[in-house]
Image: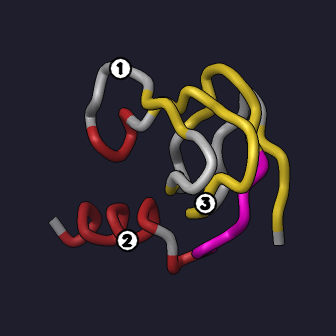
Amino acid sequence: MSFCVSMLPIPLDGMVLEGEAMVNQAALTGETMTVRKTMGATVYAGTVVEEGECVLVAKAEGSANRYAALSCILFML
């Protein structure tokens, strides 16, 4: 499954097939700067495309993604 993402939250963990985007990963990493993602880069659910556009292929979705795992850990605290 592949889809195009532009100026939206990324709904699942995946890999960039084509395009380029600046991704805000603050929800997962706390980084204040956006991160450049190009072909072959990994992107994570819960992050947001701030600029650009890319086509992604899914690696993990639903409760199998990194954002869900982090939420589960925080819930247990």
- The residue tagged 2 is 69
| Marker disc for residue 33 | 1
Label located before the other in sequence (3 or 2): 3
Q: Kindly report which numbered mark, 1 or 3, lies closer to the viewer in this rendering.
A: 3
Could you say whether the residue bearing mark 1 is in a helix, strand or loop? loop
Choose between 17 and 1: the one closer to the eye: 17
Separation of disc 3 and disc 2 at Cα?
A: 18 Å
The numbered dot on residue 15 is 3
Say if 9 sits above or below 35 in the image.
below
Horizontal and vertical percent position of residue 60:
58, 75
- Reply yes or no: does residue 53 show up in magenta: no
> Callout 3: few (<14), some (14-19), or many (20+) C-alpha neighbours within 10 Å?
many
Most common secondary structure along the magenta stretch: strand
Mark 1 to mark 2: distance in Å?
Answer: 23 Å
Query: Mark 1 or 2 closer to N-term?
Result: 1
CB within 8 Å, label 1 to label 3: no
Q: Position of residue 36 (x, y in %)?
A: 49, 31
Q: Mark 1 or mark 3: which comes first in sequence?
A: 3
Q: Are marks 3 and 2 in contact (CB under 8 Å)?
A: no
Q: State the SS at label 2.
A: helix
Discs 1/2, front = 1
Measured as percent of width and height from the top left, residue 10 is found at 64, 47
Residue 56 is one of the magenta-drawn residues: yes
Which residue type does callout 1 highlight?
Answer: Met
Q: Judge depth for marks 3 and 2 and give the one in front.
A: 3
Looking at the rendering, which quadrant does residue 22 occupy?
A: top right
Query: Magenta residues, as a range?
Result: 55-61
Going by the image, does 18 lie left or right of 32? right
